[in-house]
Amino acid sequence: DTAVSQTPKYLVTQMGNDKSIKCEQNLGHDTMYWYKQDSKKFLKIMFSYNNKELIINETVPNRFSPKSPDKAHLNLHINSLELGDSAVYFCASSQDLDGQNTEAFFGQGTRLTVV
Amino acid sequence: AQSVTQLGSHVSVSEGALVLLRCNYSSSVPPYLFWYVQYPNQGLQLLLKYTSAATLVKGINGFEAEFKKSETSFHLTKPSAHMSDAAEYFCAVSDRLGGGFKTIFGAGTRLFVKA
């Protein structure tokens, strides 16, 4: 069983299109994240949801809209895709146990290429 | 505000030599600290974590890290490098934000292992 699964694994699309990436975790965690990893491997947090509520929204263009229908899912929708959006997007989840943060469990990533 | 600095974007060692990957952090409260490894085209995998218990933390694959509050450091070491250790390594710091936690990653260090 895959703990954090993302679909699709690869996504090639044209500029201006709208696309979504789905993420599901079966770990029972309360917190889910989206990270963007650029070509230089730099990982930047984009969003974090705790029990379906947005708690972190970094300086991300509003073309990016996360949606959490339940605490096991955090999807990422991107409008009007631009060349600079090309990157690997990682979904992750973690759990708050008695005030202690567990490590984040990562999905395998979605490689988005905008042409 | 929390931050993580990894010294050296690339480290090259010979097989069997000591591995030392440096990480310094900045956090306003006692932090949670992590080391992750990323193999090519994969997600991140936890190597070890510090959560205010023992200052010397042992992880998987023979890695360990020592938390030094006075130096605000959490360097990763392994006594003897193996070819399979070649990967990208990320140091991360996490502390509470709102109803959950925010995890910030360093820029990563690529480890090369020479035969």
Image: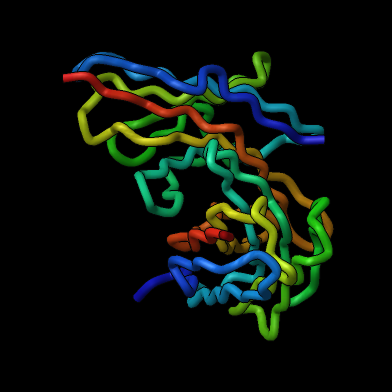
Instruction: Reply above or below: A72 against B50.
Output: below
Question: Left or right: where does residue A93 sit relative to residue B41?
Answer: right
Residue A33: percent from the left, percent from the top? 65, 61
In this view, the residue in front, A25 or B74, is: A25
Q: Which of B4 and B56 is in front in this view?
A: B4
- The residue depicted at 57 percent of the width and 58 percent of the height is A89
Rendered view: B51 above or below B96: above
Residue at screen point 81% across, 33% down? B28
Left or right: residue B33 versus residue A79 is left
Question: Which part of the image, by quadrant, shows the N terminus of chain B?
Answer: top right
Image quadrant holding the C terminus of chain B, namely top left
How far across and down, in percent of the image, does residue A96 sit?
65, 61
Q: Measured from the top left, where is residue B58 in percent x and y?
A: 39, 34
Q: Give the residue displayed 49% in from the left and 59% down from the top.
A: A111
- Which of A102 and A26 lies nearest the eye of the viewer? A26
Q: In this view, does B47 lie above or below B75?
A: below
Of all residues, the one furthest to the left in this rendering is B115
Q: Which residue does the image show at 79% across and 66% down from the upper left?
A: A63
Query: B77 or A7: which is nearer to us?
Result: A7
**Numbered circles on residues, count:** 0
